Amino acid sequence: MKKIGILAAFLVVLGIQPAAAQQQDTLVFTPQWMAQAQFAGYYVAEVKGFYREAGVNVKIKHPSPTQPAMAMLKNNVSQAITLQLCQAIEMVDGGLPIVNILQTSMNNGMMIVSARGRDPLKHKGAKVGIWSVGFGQLAICMSIKDNLEYEWIRFAQNINLFLSGALDAMLAMSYNEYNQLLQAGLEIGADCVYRFCDHGYNVQEDGVYMTRKYYLKHQEQARCFAEASRRGWEWAAEHPEETLDIVMEYVGRDNIATNRVMQRLMLMEILRLQVDRESGERAFRLRPDMVQLASRLMTENAMLDHEITYEELVP
């Protein structure tokens, strides 16, 4: 035992960390969904060595149907995850203090797509598809405010229910399901689409979060990870085709059923949503006014016990 202890001390003097210490210093990062261009900047940061250059050892671990990103954060399987702002607010309200260390989305990409030429706002009582994994909070707020009496039908990740006619409408992301519907040959008129960002619900979506407890103990690691991730997104914006090459590597590794055309459409839209409407810049910051808007809407509709403030979400 003494020999092992002496060897470990010798390695530390040489600047070589023992295997146990290396494992302990690894930051496990989990995007909230499967491999796709929505998370391209993080893939770029890993492949191009930005994390390594920043001195942080990052392992990207995607969630599974039985182990979602939020559960992985709660159970300390992952130290950093992506979340939509509304989800983060719910987690803090539920008693888990988390902090935003990097904000990528500056605009909301959610929409309601209605079938058979119907205006979603004039389709009272419609059967509307909503994701079973959550993040439909703003849609529920809107439906209550406008007294639409939607019947919410949960779906996992597929547009088939809508295409088959089982749904009158469905929630869709401008970078995902909306493009899937168009690629399936559906003609969608402007009157059939309700874009939340254009109707007073422009609440930021994806950001990177850690538990406040972990952040306070690893502030330098968090800072390096955030800066390298931002560098990855900036590189992706400047090199979209090379970024797609990287995305397709991750997609292929995880056997995701998609193609380069769909991932290109997703990447272009994700990059567009990262540009602040007001400043015209890719700002990478959580906006206090959007936190206030989301928190107020969710409190008014009994989704929160109390309003969550901007200060509760920042380090």
Image (cartoon, rainbow, N blue to C red):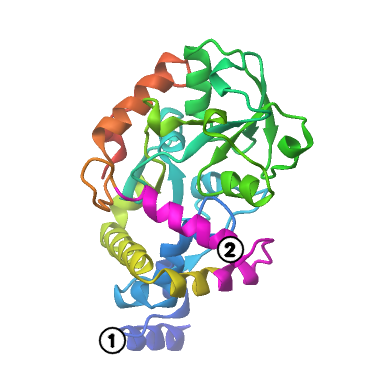
Q: Amino acid at mark 1?
A: Val
Q: Quadrant of residue 249?
A: bottom right
Left or right relative to 154: residue 293 = left
Q: Amino acid at mark 2?
A: Val
Left or right relative to 309: residue 69 = right
Q: Which residues are magenta?
A: 248-275
| 267 in magenta | yes
What percent of the width, then of the height, locates residue 304?
44, 21
Rendered view: 289 above or below 49: above
On residue 54, which mark appears?
A: none
Left or right relative to 161: residue 286 = left
Please report contact status of discs 2 and 1: CB closer than 8 Å, yes or no.
Answer: no
What percent of the width, then of the height, locates residue 36?
55, 60
Q: Main secondary structure of the magenta part?
A: helix
> Which image quarter is the C terminus in?
top left
Instruction: Note whether residue 80 is visible.
Output: no
Give the crowd class for mark 1: few <14, some 14-19, many >=20 residues within 10 Å. Answer: few
Rendered view: 199 above or below 15: above
On residue 261, which mark appears?
A: 2
Q: Nearer the viewer, residue 289 or 168?
A: 168
> In percent of the image, x 24 and y 48: which residue is there?
280
Q: Nearer the viewer, residue 215 or 230?
A: 230
Kindly identify which residue carries mark 1: 13
Left or right relative to 218: residue 34 = right
Dot 2 lies on which element? Answer: helix
